[in-house]
Amino acid sequence: MVSARLARLIHRVIDEIWNAGDLDLADELFGARYVNHGGLIPDLVPGPEGVKFSVALYRTAFPDLHLCADDLRPSGGMVRLRWTVRSTPRSGASGSASAARAGSLTGATRISVAGGQIVESWTSWNSDEALEALGISQVGMTKLHDNPLAKGQTKSANSPVFMAGGTAQARSRRVDHD
């Protein structure tokens, strides 16, 4: 059984940060060097600022987002949270509502806590499902400069580029088309 203190910490993150949007609370509940492995924006921005960025992104894309804790239990010195999020995505940038359908997504997060703060987490979920709900899909691996929407950008070919309503380039592998 998870201690009452740990359960309270996790439920504050869910209820107050994710569901109510109190982004400033992340400064109190997450360690300065916090890293989330496996999220949609896993290691891009560490610490509470990364949490604020992620929550703001999801709450903007899914204004009626609601996260529920399905199960919370100890797991090898950490806490394992099984969760479900329900929402309807906002209409696409073009104004079309093609992706605007209600849905839910389930996942699991292992959470490491030290000094009363969350310091690291490992999230497992179907990120492709979330991207699809937003009208973003992954297609082919191409060089950044081959993408007409990305011309003039200074990012390397291994940087992720996401384009609403169309395509996403993955950074996992580079394929040259010469």
Image (cartoon, helix red, strand yellow):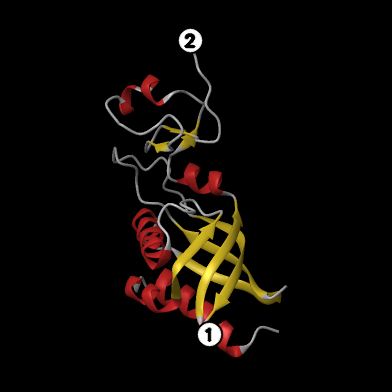
Q: Is residue 22 left or right of residue 4?
A: left
Q: Is residue 113 left or right of residue 160?
A: right
In terms of secondary structure, where does tag 1 sit? helix
Marking on residue 76: none
**Of the residues shown, which amino acid type is indicated by label 2?**
Asp
Q: Which residue is mark 2?
A: 178
Give above or below for 161 relative to 18.
above
User: How far apart are labels 1 and 2 at the CA level?
Assistant: 56 Å
Please tell me which residue is depicted at 37% across the width and 36% down the height of the picture. 163
Q: Position of residue 134 (x, y in %)?
A: 43, 45
**Of the residues shown, which amino acid type is indicated by label 1?**
Arg
Callout 1 crowding tier (Cα within 10 Å): few <14, some 14–19, many ≥20: few
Looking at the image, tell me whether mark 1 or mark 2 is earlier in sequence order: 1
Q: Which residue is mark 1?
A: 8
Q: Position of residue 172 (x, y in %)?
A: 55, 35
Q: Position of residue 125 (x, y in %)?
A: 60, 54
**Camera-side residue: 154 or 41?**
154
Please tell me which residue is depicted at 52% across the width and 62% down the height of the picture. 85
In terms of secondary structure, where does tag 2 sit? loop
Total labels drawn: 2
**Quadrant the N terminus occupies:** bottom right
Give above or below for 98 relative to 5.
above
**Camera-side residue: 101 or 71?**
71
